[in-house]
Image: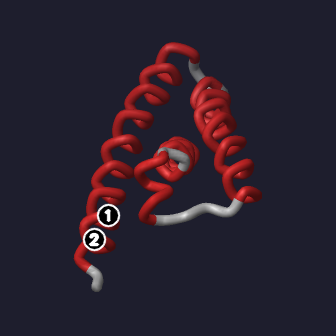
Amino acid sequence: MFVAWACAFWAHERLQPRTCKLFPLAQSRRKAYQVLRFCGPVLALFLCLYRDFEKGLLYWFGLGALAGLAVSVLMAILKHTQSRLP
């Protein structure tokens, strides 16, 4: 579930124009990232709601927040190292 959220946030960040300047994307990858950006949270929601509705929603929101923080820190580190390269 965390991985599904993390993939969705990664895809969302990769589709941003400021990120595409540092890490260019091919058109086929752009479509794949758009699908992943939509399917990641939906898949995580279905997996979280499989057992218990109330706890599933809490897990879904919590894992989404943690994945968002993890991906944003990772992308900040990657952008920082990319900008330092000659």
What residue sits 40% from the left and 44% below the top? 67
Please say if the residues under marks 1 and 2 sit with CB atoms less than 8 Å apart: yes
Give the residue type that dot 1 points to. Lys
In the rendered image, residue 2, in percent from the top left (x then y), is placed at 49, 45
In the rendered image of this protein, does residue 38 appear above or below residue 77? above
Mark 1 to mark 2 CA distance (whole Å): 6 Å
What residue sits 43% from the left and 26% below the top? 61
In the rendered image, residue 82, in percent from the top left (x then y), is placed at 32, 73
| Disc 2 secondary structure class | helix
Numbered tag placed on residue 83 in the rendering: 2
* Residue 9 appearing in the image: yes
| Quadrant in which the N terminus is drawn | top right
What residue does disc 1 label? 79
In the rendered image of this protein, does residue 30 appear above or below residue 48? below
Residue 3 placement, left or right of 85: right
In the rendered image, residue 26, in percent from the top left (x then y), is placed at 68, 63
In the rendered image of this protein, does residue 75 appear above or below residue 63? below
What residue sits 34% from the left and 50% below the top? 70
Query: Mark 2 Cα within 10 Å, few/some/many (few <14, many 20+)?
Result: few
| Quadrant in which the C terminus is drawn | bottom left
The mark tally for this picture is: 2
Of 34 and 86, which appears nearest the observer?
86
